[in-house]
Structure formats: structure tokens, C-alpha cells
Image: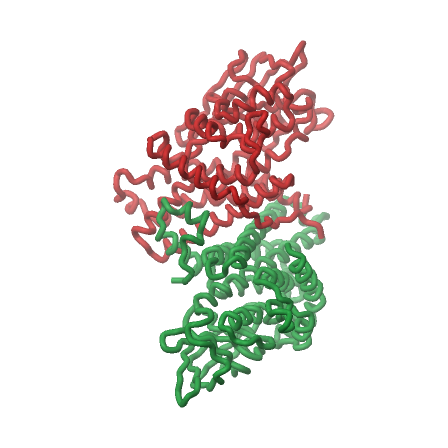
Chain colours: A red, B green
Amino acid sequence: MVMPSFRFAKTSFPSAAAELREQVRQFVTEQEACGSFVCGPGSWTRFDADMSAKIGAQGWIGMTWPKRYGGHERSALERYVVTEELLAAGVPLRAHYSADRQIGPLILQFGNEEQRRRLLPLIAAGKCACAIGLSEPDSGSDLAAMRTRATRVDGGWRVEGRKMWIGHAHKAQILNLFLRTSSTEESRHSGISRFLIDMSWPGITVRPIINLHGDHDYNEVVFDDLFVPDNMVVGEIGQAWSQLGSDLAYERSAPDRWLGAFETLKCMIDELARRPGPRQEEACGRLVAHLWTFREMSLSIAGMLERGQLPNVEAAVVKDLGTAFDQEIPNVARSLFSESMRADLDDDNLFEAVLDYDLLYAPSLSIKGGTREMLRNAIARGLGLR
Amino acid sequence: MSEMRELLVDTATRQFADLCTNAAFDVAETGSLDLRLWQALEDTGLAAATQSEARGGAGADLGDALAVVREAGSAGLPAPLAETLIAELMLASASLPPLAGPLSVGPVLGRSELELKRANNAWQLHGTMKRIPWGRHAHAVVALAEYDGKNATVVVQHPAVSRQSANYAREPRDTMHFDGLLIPDGDVSVPGSGMSVDQLQVTGALFRSVAMAGALFRTLQTTVEYAMQRQQFGRPIGKFQAIQQQVAILASQVAAANAAADAAVEAATHDLAAATFEIAAAKTRVGEAAGIAAAIAHQVHGAMGFSYEYSLQRSTRRLWSWRDEFGSEAEWAAWIGKTVARVGGRGLWAFVTSPVKNVSSAKT
């Protein structure tokens, strides 16, 4: 019987990894000491352009890209080391995370030479934040139902439509926009294209969507008679669907999928150390066993990507399990450490603040980047059931 | 995978498929061991895989042996292969000569159960060992006993079983009671050498984790096949989204369990004594996956999975048994909890990225 591996081949770090890991830890220690970031609620999901520029200056953005485009020609496993170290330390990464993980690789693989020469060095320097426009009011998991469309005009395209849930569109310089360039009549999945939009162009209105935690991270973006020149189309017109390559695997398998509630877990371990009990030991130990397993799985996927494989099903497994793990942590935390215990902590203790953040953000984790149900569909397809 | 390991795994897979017939399982169900089945394992060298070629074995390393155990777990091989391989490790670590199998080991409950005494210039063994795997069929049990505050490895030839018992898969788990049993000098190691009870527990947890990883993979295969085959409402049940979502969860658990087991194997092959955290994490993660996976597999199989005749139970009853043996996920999770409490929240990441530096090998 043929099944996809579902076996995450054990992957080990290259010899250069240990030194690189130490360099990142050194950097983090220095930055924390000089107060350029504070590890706390929200940790790495915070948007901090200065921090991204510093990380770019270290050579830690676009690590695997060619040097002629500002990259550093290092391996996917070295990139993995930097990613997990920065995430675990709670360094704000949002200002370059999407660009480094998805938009840069997209431009590298499918973009034209002008896009590569102009944008990749900026991204690698940590000076070009990117956002991604996929969802619409009537198109969520059903992406092919999107209605934002572009019509052909002299020298480019005119865009009309509305996108929802664009993370940090109000801070990004570049928006990677998915839209329809031909009707749905031929095929639902053909006729979708990807454009690069400079957010300073006229014809773009950004409206905040405040989330249930009270933060402004997502936006509704309206395009009204927006002109996009031909040279900002990525790859072939109408081929966006087939251009979805390794970026799904990168997006879904990264350590952020299981380090989302790491700050809460750290606080739990601190409390466990202060007040050990058998229930606490078992529950915290179990979570650490899961964390360690996720790391092995993400690392294995980084190894597959390094070898040029496309582990999309494996990445769906990591995202599905990882987000469930991040959702479980605040629940375990509140059950082990009661309100009265938390109320008696020192005023500068972070537990309550990180729990508040991780608990309130939890519902979003299994929605964004592919809902749990869609991921499981993908896994079932991988098993030959669909 | 090395050429040696590929060859071993290939041999094992084919041989286990031949040996694991319905008749063989029926025999095992009564608590018997099919001696022809065991002889076949001896003949191909799998039963002595880790022994040197000079000793009639395959000269395999721990990783090779565990690759074979994974296949045995997948097939549900009704024989004490894992126990024999662990016994060989114990003998080698105590500098005792190798023995012909089937062998068993003890104590298996993570506690000291035996005491060795020296009287009249002879070794005497005292105590009661419970839940000894395949005890009644073992030519010898390689056991750990306390002597003068130290630990000694003792070979008990043809041990008598005082009470027969079994796990959920009806694999024998027997009690042995010793009341001054005389042990020849040649069957006792130098006290202080060899494995400790804790190390045996860790080693057993590793072997069970790997066997479960194999059984989980088989459970997934069986379930996917069944879902494609079984028709209801005019189509295979695997075409229903409700079933697909459940099987996807099953596949994810199997994948996570295998990743955890593989990582533990890697760490243990490198240095078994320094791999306690990795093995603890694997037993914890694999044991949890076993419970979730078995429940989903049975739900997808409907009533059919509840029958003895259908093969699913060969995997699931072993999963339910093995997750409890050599420490349940609850026990190992508690050990991990105690261990990480020592490093605290700030040290957690450094610990996870480099557990070896942070754990002393002994189980507390």
C-alpha cells in the first residue's frame, strides 16, 4: 500500500549549527540587556521594524537566498536554527517574518529579475515588511471563491475588490495580493494571479479589524481603481495556484506553530519549580515531551526542504498538532495554577499577562494559515482517502 | 539507513510476515510460545542480532536491533524478541557470556525487587519479581539484584514461575519468587557492574516505545485499508468527511509518535546512558498517541474491530499493554516534570535543545 511517508526522517544539525546557535543566543542576550526588546506577552508576534533591521544586519533574513540578491547562501537547517532561537527567546519578528518565510522565496522562485534585484535585498536587510492578501468577506477556506479581480489595461491591471484579515497591512510596505484575472467559468482554481502591491500607491484603503484581545493586527483592505503595472505580476498570469510550492510547507511547519504559547509554558515551569506537586510535574512534563517531539518534526521538515522535497502533508500534520498544543497550554496552565495562586504572585510576575495573551489568541491559531478542518482534509488526501 | 540495517529490516519484515499467521496468534493467545517460531528467529540470527558474528549473531548495533523491534511491533510478533535483545545488552554490560534465547529480564517495574546474599560460599537469591515478560518460556531471566548496597546482574537459569499472569494482549507477564535460590558463581556479575534497575527501566521504555511506533504504523495502515474497503450508504466509508477527519488525527498521532521514537533511538544509539530524557519523552509521547490512535482505529472499524477474528486487535491490545510497561506516559511525564523544574522557565529552551548536558542519567 502506498502512503506518504508520515515518517519524519530523523534529521541532525550540520556542524556549523552549534556555533550559529551560540551567535544567536549572544545577540539575544545583548539586545535584551540593552533593552531593545522585552520578552513578554505576544513575544515574537510583535512588529518592531528596528529589531528586524538589526536581525537583517546579522545576516539572518533571507539566509538561504543567493548572495547576489542580498541572501547568504546558507542551508535550510541553519535558517531553522536562527528561526527557532529567535522565536523561543521572544524576539519581535513580525516586521520581517512573512517576507522571509513566504514572499522572499516566492519572488525568488517565480518573480522577475527586476523584482528580485529591487525587493530581495531590502527584505534581507529587514527593511521591507510584507503582508499577504488572501481572505475576503465571502472567501475564507474556499479561496477559489475570491472575487477581488484585475482587468487588463494598457501597461498593467486595474484592481477592484476587498480583502479581509490581512495581518499588518497597515505597517507593511509590500502586499502580496491574490486575485482573479479571469472568470471562474473555466476552472475554479485557474485564473488566480499574485501581484505585488506597493502599499503607498493610490487606490488602497486600509481599515483596522480589532481582535478580541483588543489589538490591531488584522485589516480590511479595499482596492478602488488601483493600477498595478505589469512588472509587479509574480510569475505567470492565472497560475498562482500551481505556484503554491514550498511556501505552504515553510508556513505550516515552522517552529512558531508550536512555540505560540511558550511564554506561558515557561511561567508554568517556574511555578512548578517554586511549588512542586505530582499533578504539576506530570502535566508540565507531558507538555515538554510534546514540545520536544514538535521540534524533531519541524527539524525533519527543514531537512526535507533542504533536500528539495515538498513535505506539504507533513507540514499540515505539524500545524494541526502544533496549534492544538498551543491552544492546550493556557488551559493546562489555568487548571494547574488556580486564580488564587496567580493572584498571589509578585506584581512583576509575567504569568497572568502571558496567560491572558495566549488564552485570548488561542482561537485564532487553528484558523489562520489553513483551518484545522482544511489541514485534516489535506492529510486525508495524502492518505488516499480523498 | 545503513546497508546492514536495511538488510536486517528487510529480513525481519519478511520473516515476521511469514511467522505471524492466524494459527501463531491463536497459539499465543493461550499463553504458549511456539517453539518453531522461536527457532526460526534463532536460525535467521534475529534473536541474537546484537551479538557478535563470532557468537552467531549479526553484530548489529542498538539502532539496528531497535529497527528490528519496530518491525516486530508492527507485526505483533508473539515472541520475547525485545526481551531477549534487552537481556543480551544486560549480559554484555555486566561482562557475562551470551546465552541462547528465549530470554527475559527483570525487575520490570522500576523498583528493586531482588536481594543477593552470600552464605556458605555460595550466592543465594531472595525476593519476588512481578510482571516478568514471557517468564514461563524464558530459558533464563537476566535479573538485577542488590548486594551489599550495590547492584549485581544475575542469570537465573530455567526460572520457576510462581504465578502466571498476562497483559491485555495475553502476552505472559509472570511472577517469580526466590527464597534463597542458589546461583552458580559464573552466573553473577561483579557487584557494581552492569545495568542499574533505573537503566533497565529506561532501556525497556525505549524498546516498548519503538515497538509501539511500529504497531501504530500498522494500526494506521489497517484503518486506511478498511476505510477504503468498507461500503456503507453506497460508498466506502473513507469517502465521508467525518471519517476522513478522524483518520487524519490518527495519522498525525502516528507521525508524531514515530518522530519521537526515532529521535530516542538516535540518542540511545549514540549513548544509551545519556539518552534518558529522549527516551522519557518518547515513551510519554508514543504512549499518548497509542491511546488516541487505538480509539480512533476502533471507531472507524465499527463493530468489526471488536471481533477477535479481525486483525486490528493484534495491534491495539499490544498498544494498550505496552504503553503501561516500563513506565506509563504519566510516570515518565512526571519524571520529565521533575527534571525541567530544576532548570526553570528560563532554562527550558536550552534544556530542550540540549537535554544531554542537562540530565543526569539516573531516574529519580
Across and down, in percent, residue B276 comes to 46, 59
Based on the displayed image, in which of its 4 quarters is residue B82 positioned? bottom right
Q: Nearer the viewer, residue B346 or B296?
A: B346
Give x and y (percent) for residue A265.
40, 45
For residue B22, above or below residue A84 = below
Task: Examine the rendering and report whether any part of residue A219 can be seen.
Answer: no
Residue A256 percent across, percent down from the top left: 49, 38
Q: Quadrant of the C terminus of chain B?
A: bottom left
- Identify which residue is drawn at 30% across, 51% down: A274
* Residue A186 placement, left or right of A143: right
Left/right of residue A240 with respect to residue A87 in the rendered view: right
Residue A202 location (% of width, % of height): 53, 11
**Which residue appears farthest toward the top when viewing the image?**
A154
Q: Quadrant of residue B33?
A: bottom right
Numbered-mark total: 0
Q: Is residue B243 visible?
A: yes
Taking the view exactly as shown, the residue that stands out farthest to the bottom is B120
Q: Which residue is painted at 45% across and 45% down in the image?
A: A328
The N terminus of chain B is located in which quarter? bottom right
Indicate whether B9 appears above or below A333. below
